[in-house]
Image (cartoon, rainbow, N blue to C red):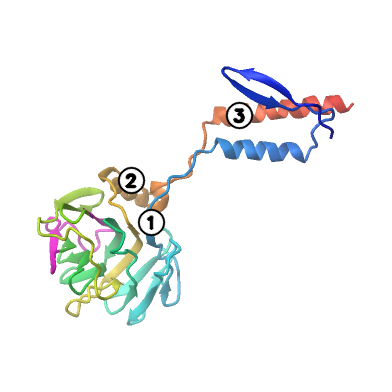
Amino acid sequence: MTENKNKTARAGNRFSTLRTFRTALSSATLPAILLTLAASLLPAQANADLVAHYKLDDGSGTVAVDSAGGDQDANQNQGTVTWTATGLIGGALDLDGFSSLQAEDALSPADDTAFTMSAWANPNTDGGYKGNYAGRNHPGNWGLNIESGHGDFRFATGTSHGVDSPDNSIVAAGGWYHMAITWEGDGVNKTGIAYLNGVPIGLAPGQILAVYLPPTDFYNIGDDPCCGGREFNGQIDDIAVWNEALTEEQIMTIYEGGLAGIDAPTSLNPNVIPEPSTLTLAALGLLALLGFTRRRRK
């Protein structure tokens, strides 16, 4: 393939350089052009500030992998953790009320002024106080728990304060429930919101912390290690943590996505496909070019 001299064409108020070729583009070159053009038409995927994600699809073993790519893999802490292949979104953690996992804090007090914690839970039993994803030991008591038929959404206050969902809003044999909390603070002002099944159910009290302080211990999956006997009996799925406070609309998107079998990060950032007409026109144009160059070869 040889190239003619460059030609300059005016397009509006801009100039662009065109190149013409004496011979046809090869059959190997055209598919590459098509792929490049198609990729350029895809909009960039939004950057979610995801800092931990436990899909809980591991299926066996004693470790729940953090698929967000951090160093927060959750390791078996007590008992023997078990798994099920039939969670809400793929597999899930299947706990017996005597076992749990622990993970390092994914949030950093040095640079985080907001977070969101999200998880799905399917309890087998009612009664008592049970931890789903909880950090304990003062001053950083944060997390998602279930207490005798309702959600207990924990915010740090120097000790801690729970925002409760209505009575009998989370019951055994009631299926899967989505729980989430968002928090943001600037050192003076602060806001905490608790969500159940995509809907805000309460605001944290004014005495919650205005800066993020971590628990002095680990974050626990399937336990609240405050007082003993708080291990969860049931299934837990798709735990995710962001270092931003997601909006009410985003929390609802996560809830609806989970019901459709889509994990939280994917629900927020789906792969967007261009309008079919755009790709169709591009493909037709390149196919026409291919046909033209083949005729030139004859």
Q: Provide the residue span drawn in magenta.
A: 157-184
Tell me the CA gap for discs 2 and 1.
16 Å
User: Residue 269 appears at what percent x and percent y?
Assistant: 42, 46
Crowd class of label 1 (few under 14; some 14 to 19; many from 20; radius 10 Å): some
Q: Amino acid at mark 1?
A: Leu
Judge by depth and name the residue closer to the eye, 65 or 98. 65
Outermost residue, right side: 298
Q: Is residue 49 above or below residue 281?
A: below
Q: Which label is found at residue 50?
A: 1
Q: Amino acid at mark 3?
A: Thr
Outermost residue, bottom side: 79
Q: Is-magenta flag for residue 169?
A: yes
Residue, disc 2: 253
Q: Can residue 296 be seen in this snapshot?
A: yes
Q: Is residue 245 above or below residue 68?
A: above
Judge by depth and name the residue closer to the eye, 58 or 69. 69
User: Residue 180 appears at what percent x and percent y?
Assistant: 26, 56
Q: Secondary structure at mark 3?
A: helix
User: Residue 40 appears at what percent x and percent y?
Assistant: 58, 37
User: Residue 22 appears at what percent x and percent y?
Assistant: 84, 27
Residue, disc 3: 280
Q: Earlier in the sequence, mark 2 or mark 3?
A: 2
At 21% from the left edge and 68% from the top edge, which residue is drawn?
140
Q: Is residue 59 above or below residue 289?
A: below
Of circles 2 and 1, which is in front?
A: 1
User: Image check: 196 left or right of 68?
Assistant: left
Q: Is-magenta flag for residue 47?
A: no
Q: Secondary structure at mark 1?
A: strand
